[in-house]
Image: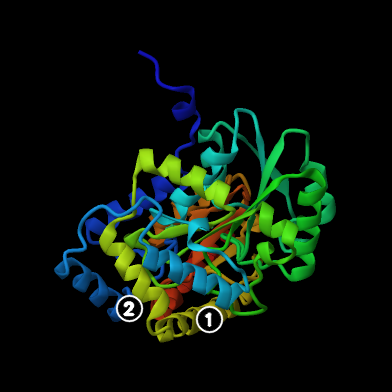
Amino acid sequence: MKYSKRALEINESVTLEITAKAKEMKDKGADIITFGVGEPDFNTPENIIEAAIKAMKDGKTKYTNTSGIIELRKAICDKLLKDNSLSYNPNQIVVSTGAKQSLANILFTLLNDGDEVIISSPYWVTYPELIKLAGGVPIVCECNLFNDYKFTKSNLENCISKKTKAIIVNSPNNPTGSIYNVEELKIIAEIAKENDIFIISDEIYEKLIYEEKHESIASISKDSYDRTIIINGLSKSYSMTGWRIGYTASSEKIANLINNIQSHTTSNVNTISQYAGVEALTGNQESIYTMKNAFNERRDYMIDRLSKIKDISYIYPKGAFYVMVNIEKYIDNVKVKDSIEFAKELLEKEKVAVIPGEAFGLPKYIRLSYATSLERIEEGLNRINNYLNSMKL
Ligand code: PLP
């Protein structure tokens, strides 16, 4: 009995072991500070919850069409026009079970075996695995601190080959919090045009920006609009991670292909969530700003504290809710040999859970999420400080 090559090639998440261990310790009563989570700690806003209850009571509990109810796809088109000055019609939108499924759909739509997809490092942990699952080859473009870990003309051109099919642009970025400006996006759009490749633009953290402004690469030119598939969703901006609503905006041709794939895998997104999604996009938007302000306050606090800790540095985050912290000077091959071991020890000794940079292709870093309360951040940083001090002894 042999399993598929594809399944066997998918790496187990580096984060899994630490997250599982943290949970086990918590279940046994330990006071664990979790800096690992990738979701807002706020509950979904009340008006959205009410809309879901109403949908159930109104009998909106059956299948819908695969790409989503028309009200939701229209609301997404209105959002894209209002926020991004992009004109789409509902036939260009496919609503999926989270942005993660949107990405999977796109990759299955675009890739043939051996096609290459370029991603920048550090990257969201799912990109390389999903590319492989779809038969593609992830090409990791080495980026560096001097360009905020973003694509530049030279590092991107170095990664292009005859097999390049697409490039994934993630702005704001998980895990660095970097944001692309218009000039940088123009360079990527130009390279994509010259080489005739698709652009997959993951904009899931769009609403969580504390400096600068979000620009979608699809708005750079008519050409970039045509070759870009936007991924976005409600998980992060409306604190709706569990509702599973993501979407793509693309050409009608691509939307139809995505629709076909989804029709044979999961069909429509949970109907109740879709009605809640309409309320999220069309109802009162106040909660987005309240959450964003809270994240901004936590970010400022976290980076202020981190900048006072000796012998560490961090990638300055402008968006999302993560900080990548460089712990290189504490990796000495004696006490800890890499950031995985560092994270395990930190959990064991100080009961703080962090994600090792290996998960994102950036060893010697750990990722801290500030999607947790200020009090917990303060306590967690005190503990990290204790741990670092103990390592110097
Ligand atoms: N894209 C990025 C960069 C993410 O960090 C995440 C979730 O962590 C997603 C997409 C997936 O979001 P969703 O919960 O909508 O599937």
Residue at the spot x=41%, y=44% of the render? 262
Q: 32 and 237: which one is in front?
A: 237
Q: Which of marks 1 and 2 is in front?
A: 2
Residue 379, position in %: x, y? Answer: 42, 75
SS at badge 2: loop
Mark 2 crowdedness (10 Å alpha carbons): few <14, some 14-19, many ≥20: some
3D distance between C-alphas at marks 1 and 2: 19 Å
Which amino acid, by three-letter code, is at mark 2? Pro
SS at badge 1: helix
Total numbered badges shown on the rendered structure: 2
Residue linked to disc 1: 296
Q: Which of pointers 1 and 2 lies earlier in the amino acid sequence?
A: 2
Residue at the spot x=72%, y=38% of the render? 164
Task: Indicate how the structure is coloured in the image.
Answer: rainbow
Task: Tell whether 111 sits left or right of 191.
Answer: left
Which amino acid, by three-letter code, is at mark 1? Asn
Residue linked to disc 2: 45
Residue 65, position in %: x, y? Answer: 34, 52
Which of the 4 image quarters holds residue 202?
bottom right
In this view of the protein, can residue 390 be seen by the observer? no
Q: 65 and 155: which one is in front?
A: 65
Residue 385, position in %: x, y? Answer: 52, 69
Residue at the spot x=57%, y=60% of the render? 175
